[in-house]
């Protein structure tokens, strides 16, 4: 219906009730959904802080730097779990980011269509595997393999470095980091592949027309154009690694001390909460909730950084792509 017809009072009166209330109903439902999301997030934050408040009053900011977790003496600190979270997440990101980018390049630029779809489907299915199943696989398969093969080899070659010192173990930081690598690789791959698919074909064809090889096209066109998207995908994977609980709790060992060696057992923020919260009470439960507050802060920081990088990088990546394409 044309705009002039809609301005006619007679024609406008003929519109049925659904047409007349459609716009305000859509606006109201959409606003209600947005408000509900804000209320849920605010409720979660309030409840976690409220539960953690006794520990916050008891330990203050020193909780973050205290290397102790003793329910008997009622002394609790987050330092071992902060250390374990940072170490396992960093190692997982160090492994997963290049693997994911390589997979995405293969699927978008190199793989034949008959191979691309099955491989992409299998990678997406990997993200759908329940974390508890991955944890069981880590206990039964990965842990013994790390203890009997990988860790002895690392110790024999790099044992002079403190992080590769100590006796090989089926449980520890390194095993947990490998599990996290498997878990975040599908996420980073999925987002990065979608980013690569947004690269304009005109830029690729111009690169080929100027004599570039496929690798030169990928290096000088695809990667610069997708830089912010790759960084954002990597940081989203980091957020998943930081917050993972069940699978990590099954393979990291559950120790509450800081160990320099990656072969030793340890703990993370999420794993400690998942393994002890149900059987805790009093100050211990409040301290676990305090770990939850720290974990929430980590999650917010990671997501804010991802958004800022993606938003600021769009224009810069396009300008860099134009400059490099013109230099081919």
Image (cartoon, helix red, strand yellow):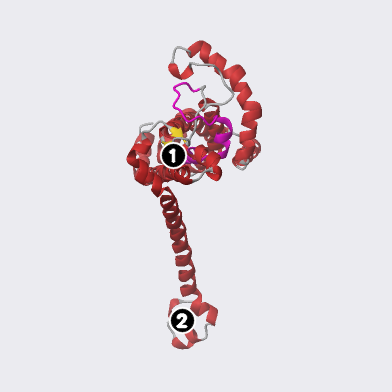
Residue at far bottom of view:
10
Closer to us: 308 or 262 = 262
- The image's mark for residue 163 is none
Q: Position of residue 168 (x, y in %)?
A: 56, 18
Q: Position of residue 42 (x, y in %)?
A: 42, 57
Q: Residues within 10 Å of mark 1 (few under 14, many from 20)?
A: many
Name which residue lies at 50% across and 33% down.
101
Can residue 293 be seen?
Answer: yes
Name which residue lies at 45% across and 34% down.
69
Name which residue lies at 55% across and 35% down.
249
The magenta region covers 235-262
Residue 243 lies in the magenta stretch = yes
Query: Measured along the vertical axis of the image, is residue 153 above or below residue 75?
Result: above
The quadrant of the picture occupied by the C terminus is: top left
The residue carrying mark 2 is: 5
Q: Position of residue 5 (x, y in %)?
A: 46, 81
Can residue 210 be seen?
Answer: no
The residue carrying mark 1 is: 235
Query: Measured along the vertical axis of the image, is residue 12 above or below residue 39?
Result: below
Q: Left or right: 23 with respect to 123?
A: left
Residue 134 lies in the magenta stretch = no
Q: Quadrant of residue 144?
A: top right
Of callouts 1 and 2, the N-terminal one? 2
Q: Position of residue 268 (x, y in %)?
A: 48, 35
Closer to us: 31 or 59 = 59
**Foreground mark, 1 or 2?**
1
Residue at far front of view:
73
Closer to us: 119 or 87 = 87
């Amino acid at each position: 219906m044309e705009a002039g017809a809609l301005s006619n009072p007679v024609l406008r009166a003929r519109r049925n009730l659904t047409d007349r209330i459609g716009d305000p109903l859509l606006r109201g439902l959409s606003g209600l959904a947005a408000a509900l999301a804000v209320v849920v997030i605010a409720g979660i934050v309030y409840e976690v802080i409220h539960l953690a408040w006794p520990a916050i009053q008891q330990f203050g900011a020193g909780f973050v730097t205290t290397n102790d977790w003793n329910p008997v003496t009622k002394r609790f600190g987050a330092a071992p779990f902060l250390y374990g979270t940072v170490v396992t997440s960093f190692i997982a990101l160090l492994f997963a980011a290049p693997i994911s980018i390589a997979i995405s390049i293969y699927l978008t630029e190199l793989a034949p269509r008959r191979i691309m779809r099955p491989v992409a489907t299998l990678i997406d299915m990997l993200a759908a595997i329940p974390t508890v199943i991955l944890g069981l696989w880590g206990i039964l398969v990965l842990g013994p393999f790390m203890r009997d093969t990988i860790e002895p080899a690392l110790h024999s070659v790099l044992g002079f470095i403190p992080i590769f010192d100590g006796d090989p173990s089926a449980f520890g930081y390194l095993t947990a980091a490998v599990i996290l690598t498997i878990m975040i690789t599908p996420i980073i791959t999925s987002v990065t592949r979608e980013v690569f698919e947004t690269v304009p074909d005109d830029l690729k064809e111009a690169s080929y027309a100027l004599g570039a090889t496929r690798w030169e096209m990928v290096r000088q066109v695809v990667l610069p154009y997708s830089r912010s998207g790759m960084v954002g995908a990597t940081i989203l994977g980091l957020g998943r690694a930081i917050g993972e609980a069940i699978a990590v709790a099954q393979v990291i060992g559950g120790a509450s001390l800081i160990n320099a060696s990656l072969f030793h057992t340890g703990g993370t923020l999420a794993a400690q909460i998942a393994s002890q919260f149900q059987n805790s009470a009093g100050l211990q439960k409040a301290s676990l909730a305090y770990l939850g507050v720290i974990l929430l802060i980590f999650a917010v920081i990671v997501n804010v950084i991802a958004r800022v990088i993606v938003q600021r990088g769009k224009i810069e990546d396009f300008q860099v792509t134009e400059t490099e394409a013109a230099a081919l």
